[in-house]
């Protein structure tokens, strides 16, 4: 049975397989594929703000899988780490030359970059090949949200690589540390600290607006149908847990109690909390149908106090939008909750806060 963590790892692995498919360990020669077509015209200006003069080059970039050396201030940066690396750059006023294609499609990333992104290479898998990356002539690669144990040496033949500081395959832990590592490589540490301060201030304001969240518990789940079932998403060290912490909630009662992130039917009885959020991933937008009743009709679910109290929230997703109480809104909420960086987390918090407040009765 595939867990949400494994789903995200599989998505990252699929990206890596496309990155490395049919690729040698060296940059391509004259017989390599043509350069990827730009999806937006180049701005013609500097993609990064002026360097602050605090990072000393050459800079050794350490990782669990080796080191690479950044010899001088970079100007062309590829951001491959899902949303996080792209969001770190946008937060400090920088623009990558390439991002994961989905990044520019997300609601929270619209107009996030100061300049147009030079290229988003789309193939059948929505990913890149090593040759396509090399053709863009990057001088730095960001990939901080994946385990690169099998691929680090290949990536660094193109450009130095900023990675995660842990070999944990789920890449858990404070994202702020990864943002600081990216900013140091770009010599934009002051800009990063200002962005992190603004992030904290935004959440201080949100908590002040919704004081009723303080100390309340949330169990966040996602329903994938009868075959896979219901998955916990705000377990220990996850992006979702970080999001709810920032909103002022107490940590989930099931933070570390669930041995695997999918719940058996018997474990449904452990879902009681002040709020229960379920993302319905079985919704068929074309047919307007869902299999969520296979969960919500179960006696174990119906007998939960959080359900009886009317504090259980179900939000359907279409693949490009979310539906709450029959109204469709743009954006993939589950990805904002579970995989986004600082920009997506604030977007998700602003979406969820009024829903949670209404459900709690305040």
Image: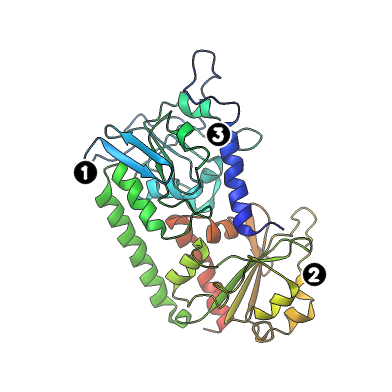
Name the image quarter holding the N terminus: bottom right
Determine which residue is flagged by label 2: 294
**Residue tagged 1:** 52
Discs 3, 2 touching: Cβ within 8 Å: no
Gap in Å between the C-alphas at discs 3 and 2?
A: 38 Å
The mark nearer the N terminus, 3 or 2, is 3
Distance CA(mark 1)–CA(mark 2): 56 Å
| Residue 322 x, y percent position in the rendering | 63, 60
Front residue of 145 and 165:
165
* Tag shown at residue 19: 3
- Residue positioned 43% across, 52% down in the render: 166
Residue in front for this viewpoint, 299 or 198:
299
Toward which corner of the image does residue 273 lie, by quadrant? bottom right
Q: Are marks 1 and 3 in contact (CB under 8 Å)?
A: no
Residue 37 shows in the view: no
Q: CA distance from mark 1 to mark 3?
A: 32 Å
Question: In terms of secondary structure, where does tag 3 sit?
Answer: helix
Q: Nearer the viewer, residue 177 or 202?
A: 177
Q: Nearer the viewer, mark 1 or mark 3?
A: 3
Q: Earlier in the sequence, mark 1 or mark 2?
A: 1
Q: Secondary structure at mark 1?
A: loop
- Taking the spot 34% from the left edge, 48% from the top edge, the residue there is 181
Residue 170 pos. (x, y %): 53, 55
Of residues 31 and 121, the one nearer the viewer is 31
Please say if 236 is above or below 82.
below
Dot 3 alpha-carbon crowd within 10 angstroms: few under 14, some 14 to 19, many 20 or more: many
Q: Residue 65, percent across and down?
A: 43, 42
Q: Is residue 240 left or right of residue 58?
A: right
């Amino acid at each position: 049975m595939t867990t949400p963590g494994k789903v995200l790892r599989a998505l990252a692995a699929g990206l890596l397989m496309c990155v490395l498919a049919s690729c040698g360990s060296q940059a391509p020669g004259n017989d390599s594929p043509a350069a990827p077509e730009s999806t937006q015209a180049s701005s013609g200006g500097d993609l990064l703000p002026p360097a602050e003069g605090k990072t000393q080059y050459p800079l050794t970039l350490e990782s669990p899988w080796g080191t690479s050396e950044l010899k001088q201030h970079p100007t062309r940066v590829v951001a491959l780490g899902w949303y996080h690396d792209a969001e770190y750059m946008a937060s400090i006023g920088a623009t990558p030359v390439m991002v994961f294609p989905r990044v520019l499609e997300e609601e929270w990333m619209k107009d996030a970059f100061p300049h147009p992104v030079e290229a988003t290479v789309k193939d059948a898998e929505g990913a890149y090949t090593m040759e396509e990356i090399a053709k863009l002539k990057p001088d730095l690669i960001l990939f901080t949200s994946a385990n690169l144990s099998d691929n680090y040496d290949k990536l660094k033949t193109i450009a130095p690589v900023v990675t995660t500081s842990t070999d944990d395959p789920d890449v858990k832990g404070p994202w702020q540390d990864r943002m600081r590592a990216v900013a140091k490589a770009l010599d934009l540490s002051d800009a990063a600290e200002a962005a992190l301060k603004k992030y904290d201030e935004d959440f201080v304001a949100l908590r002040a607006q919704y004081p009723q969240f303080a100390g309340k518990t949330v169990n966040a789940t996602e329903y994938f149908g009868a075959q896979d079932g219901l998955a916990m998403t705000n377990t220990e060290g996850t992006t979702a847990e970080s999001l709810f912490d920032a909103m002022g909630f107490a940590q989930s009662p099931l933070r570390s109690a669930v041995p695997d992130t999918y719940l058996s039917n018997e474990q449904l009885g452990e879902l009681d909390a002040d709020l229960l959020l379920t993302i319905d991933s079985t919704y068929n937008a074309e047919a307007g149908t869902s299999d969520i009743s296979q969960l919500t009709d179960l006696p174990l679910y119906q007998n939960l106090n959080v359900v009886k109290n009317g504090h259980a929230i179900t939000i359907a997703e279409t693949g490009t939008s979310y539906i709450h109480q029959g109204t469709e809104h743009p954006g993939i909420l589950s990805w904002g909750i579970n995989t986004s960086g600082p920009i997506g987390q604030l977007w998700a918090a602003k979406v969820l806060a009024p829903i949670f407040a209404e459900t709690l009765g305040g």
